[in-house]
Image (cartoon, rainbow, N blue to C red):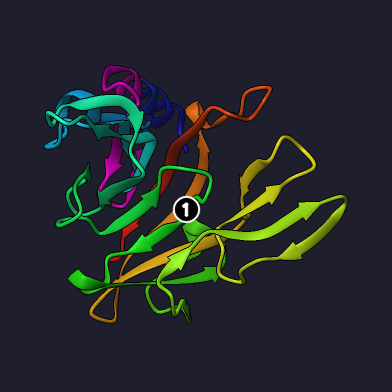
Amino acid sequence: MNKLFTTAALVCALSLGFTSCSKDDNNTIQVETPKVIKDLKSNSKTDFTQGELAVKNDIFSLKNFKQFARSEDGKPTAEAAKIYYYNFSENDGTDIKTNMISLSGDTKVTLTANTENGYTLSYIDKAFNDVVATDNFTAISSNSSAIYKMKFGGQESVRSESGWCNYDGDNNHLVTAQENRTLIISKHGKPFFKLKMNSIYENEKANEDANNFVFYSIDYQEFK
């Protein structure tokens, strides 16, 4: 690269906030930073949802997702709902009728596909960014995914082969995502979205007692 183009590219990057610069149609320099596109507490279609949604390179990152129970008068309370609902197509927390998945609001940490609306669940042990729609996925007959491995008294056992997380009873009951396990949401048998479950803890970090849950953080992307 010559000095003139190097200087021009630098000026372009600075002027555009490090978004994209190009020399010509065949040479493009592009650097994208995550953009927060929605605060679900103030912009959700529901009034009992919280969370932050950002996007980078067509990958959506949902953080601190939580929904709240309603009181007898129908208003949201400060108590976590027993089940949270989310729809990846809408990029929003939803309800029992319009969800794509449901998530346990307690230590069961179960993700379930909404089969009534045609969604099914499968998985693959492959890094999220490398997963493509033509990969061979393992179907989950229950269409639910929860704990994979459990550890007690130094002994580890498999609870469910299709689980997305691991439970450590010897370490404050810590729950951690299974590395490189990607969940797949299909609609009427066709792969639709891939999911990377990241954390159940607020701000994706367990506190000293590991009791700052359940706040789901999930990366997801639609198959093209």
Q: Residue at x 35, y 26 (%)?
A: 18
Magenta stretch: includes residue 17: yes
Locate residue 128, reporting x and y percent. Answer: 49, 58
Decide if residue 79 is on the left or right side of residue 77: right
Locate residue 115, reporting x and y percent. Answer: 27, 72
Q: Nearer the viewer, residue 116 or 198?
A: 116
Locate residue 155, reporting x and y percent. Answer: 85, 57
Task: Please state, as top left, top right, bottom left or bottom right, where the C terminus lies in the image.
Answer: bottom left
From what the image shows, is residue 152 above or below residue 47?
A: below
The magenta stretch is 11-29
* Amino acid type at image mark 1: Lys
Which corner quadrant of the image does residue 20 belong to? top left
Decide if residue 156 is on the left or right side of residue 189: right
Which corner quadrant of the image does residue 139 belong to? bottom left
Magenta stretch: includes residue 33: no
Q: Nearer the viewer, residue 18 or 34?
A: 34
Q: Residue at x 30, y 30 (%)?
A: 35
Q: Residues within 10 Å of mark 1 (few under 14, many from 20)?
A: many
Secondary structure type for disc 1: strand
Q: Residue at x 71, y 56 (%)?
A: 150
The number of numbered badges drawn on the structure is 1
Q: Residue furthest right?
A: 154
Which corner quadrant of the image does residue 66 belong to? top left
Disc 1 marks which residue? Answer: 196
